[in-house]
Amino acid sequence: MPEEFNNLVHVKNNTCQAAYIGNLGDVKRCIEKNDYNGAIKELDKVILLRPFHPEAILQKIDIYLTLKPSLHQLPVVRYDDNLLTNSEDLASLESAKLIAFTPNWALARNLYNELSGDNFKIDSDNTYKVSFCLITKNEQHNIRRCLTSLNQIENKQIIIVDTGSTDNTVEIAKSYGAEIYHHQWDNNFSRPRNKSLEYARGDWVMFLDADEELAPGALKTLKEEMAKPNILGYRLPLENVGSKLHGCNYVPRLFRNAPGLHFIGKIHETIHASILVVMRQWNMEQTIGNTKILHHGYKPEELARKNKVKRNLALYDGALEELPDEPSIMMNYAHDLNHDGQNDRAHQIYKKILDILEQYQKEHITPEVREQFIHNYGVFLAQHLKMKELSEVMNTRTARETGPVANVHYMAGLGLMNCNKFRDAIPELEASMEKAYDDTLAPSLPDIRTWKPKHFLANCHASVGNELKAVKLWEEVIEECNDSTDPYHDYARFLSTLARNKEALEVLLKGLKVQGGTQKIWELGCGIVNKDPELSEMSLEWTEEALKHHPDSDVTNVRRGESLMKNGRFAEATEYFSRLSDRGEKTATAAQLVCKQLSNQGDERDPEIARGFVNEVTGWIDVLDKAPCEFDRELAEQLIR
C-alpha cells in the first residue's frame, strides 16, 4: 500500500469517521501476524464498506505475489466455472479488476501487463447500486417529492440523517424504505453529511437535499455515467426551478464509494477537495455529468419558510474561520449578504475573491466556480450601478478565462456602454449575441437570449454615428420585442435627432401597442410634435391624448401647454404650466406669464415677477416667433420692459 495513501487516510481519520472507513489498518495487523487468510477476509470486508477500493485490490495482489501464502490459506475463487488454484492466477485476476477500476493508473497498468491480466475479462453488468444520502429537518413539504423521484432508480439505498424534525419528515421517509439515522444539529452541515457517508454501501453515492429531486430520465443518464471508466466523480447540472436565469449550476454530487472521501465546510459544505486528492492518487478524473437535479429551494415560499439567508449568515464566520479564503464559501457569503441588504460588506468580499482568483492559474480553479463567481459579481455590480467597475471586472483574466462566455461579453458591453465607451462596447455585445445559446457552466442572464443585447448594440452604433447600422438593428428589435417600450422609445428618439419625426411617431405608435411603460412613449411624442412646425396640428391631438392617459405627468402637462401656446390658444394653455410654476420652475413660470399676457389675463404684478425671468420670457417669445400662430410680440415684450 503506497505511503501516500496511508498518509491520506491518517489525515482524514482525524477529521471524521466517514473518512476512516476503508482504512487498511486491520489488514496490516493480520499480515504482521502472518495471517494471510485473515488479511484477505479483512480486505473483503473493507470492499463491502467501500466498494470502489483500488488500494484493497492492490493489497490482495501484494499478498498473493509478495508474501506467497500457502494454498490452504488462499480463498476459493471461481472464474468461468473454473477454480483458481494458485496465487499467480489469483493475482492476475485481481490485476484485471484493478485495471477495470483505474485504467490510467500507471501502477495498475504495469501490474496488469506483468501478470497477464488480459487472461481475465472483467465484465460490468451495469447494475451498480446507488446510495442516495440526504440530511433533513422538518422537510415534510418537500421530502415526498424528492423520494418519489428516486422511484425511477431500481438498485438503490436511501439514507436519511435527520437533525431534529418535529413534523412528519421521518415517517414519510420510512414509507419509501429509507434508512433513518439521527444527528443532533450543531450548526455544521458537514457533520450530518459525513454521518450519512458512514452508512453508504452502494457502488456510487449521490447526495441530494430534500428540496431537490432527480429530473425525469435520470435512470438512463445515471447508468451511462456510472459505466464510464476512470471517472471518480461527476459535477451534475442543478436547475433552480422558477429562476429567470437560463442554464444550470454544476455541483459535485455523484461519486464512487471510495475510501477517504468526506465533506468539509460548516456551510455550503463540499466533498470536492477530497475527491481531488483521491482521484490524483489513482490518476482518475472528475467531470461534468448529465443527470439533472431540480432544486426548489429558492422559490420565494421556500426562502420565507426556512429563512435561509438569516440562517446562513449566522454560520459563515465559523465556516471561514475553518476554511479561510475559500472562494466558494466567500462567494455564497457575499450573495447572501447582498440579499440581506449588507451591500458594502458584500462588495468587499467580492473584491477579495477576485484578488484570490487572479493569483491562480486557470487550471487550478474549477471552471464552474470561476464562471459562477464572475456571474454573481457582475450581477451585483450592475444591480448597484457600479458600471465602471463592471467593465473592469469583465476584462480581468479570471473573467476572460471563462471563455469568455456570453455573460461576460454582455456585462462587459453593458458596463462600457454606460461609461460612454460605445466603440469598445460594440464587439462585446456582438460576441454576447453570437454565444447566447452556447453551453455554459453557470446560469446565463435571461436578457442574453432576448432583444436586449441587439437594442444596446443599436444604441452604441447610434452614439458613434453609424446611422444605417443603428436603424437596421432597431428595425429588427421592434419586430422581436413585445414586452417593453424601451426600444421603441430609443429608436424614435434617434430618428427624431435625424429630423425624421414622422417616422419617429410611427415607431412610437407601434410602441403604444406594447403593454406597460407607455408614459415615456407619450412624453417623447409630445416633445417631437412640439418641436416640428410641420406637426403643429398633430401636436394638439397627441398632447390631448397623452394627457388622457397620464394626467399627472409634469412633462405631459407642460407639453400640452406648449402645444396650445404655439397654436395661439393662450388662455387654455395657462393652466397646464401651473404644476411646475407652483414649484418655482422658471421656464414654466415664464410660459404662464406670457400666456396670461397674450390672453389679457395678466395683472399688475406680472411685470414685476417677469423681471426675475427675463431670459426665460425672451426665450418663449422667440419660440412663438417660429410657431405657426399669430401673436402680438409688442404686447408680450411689455412684460419685461
Image (spheres, rainbow, N blue to C red):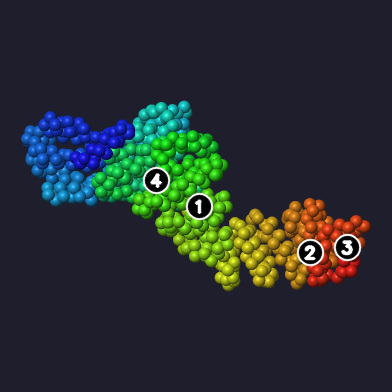
Label 1: element kind? helix
- Given this view, does label 2 or label 1 mark the residue nearer the observer? 1
> Could you tell me if the residues under marks 2 and 1 are in contact, i.e. CB atoms within 8 Å?
no
Distance, label 3 to label 4, CA atoms, is: 75 Å
Toward which corner of the image does residue 438 lie, by quadrant? bottom left
> Could you tell me if the residues under marks 3 and 2 are in contact, i.e. CB atoms within 8 Å?
no
Point out the image quarter for the N terminus.
top left
Residue 448, horizontal then vertical, whole percent: 51, 57
Toward which corner of the image does residue 168 lie, by quadrant? top left
- Given this view, does label 1 or label 3 mark the residue nearer the observer? 3
Residue 190, horizontal then vertical, whole percent: 38, 35
Q: Residue at x 16, y 45 (%)?
A: 95
- Given this view, does label 4 or label 1 mark the residue nearer the observer? 1
Question: Callout 3 environment at 10 Å: few (<14), some (14 to 19), or many (20+)?
Answer: many
Sooner in the amino-acid sequence: mark 1 or mark 3: 1
Sooner in the amino-acid sequence: mark 3 or mark 2: 2
Question: Callout 1 environment at 10 Å: few (<14), some (14 to 19), or many (20+)?
Answer: many
> Could you tell me if the residues under marks 3 and 4 are in contact, i.e. CB atoms within 8 Å?
no
Label 4: element kind? strand
Sooner in the amino-acid sequence: mark 3 or mark 4: 4
Residue 462, horizontal then vertical, whole percent: 59, 67
Residue corresponding to mark 3: 639
Residue corresponding to mark 1: 378
> Could you tell me if the residues under marks 4 and 1 are in contact, i.e. CB atoms within 8 Å?
no
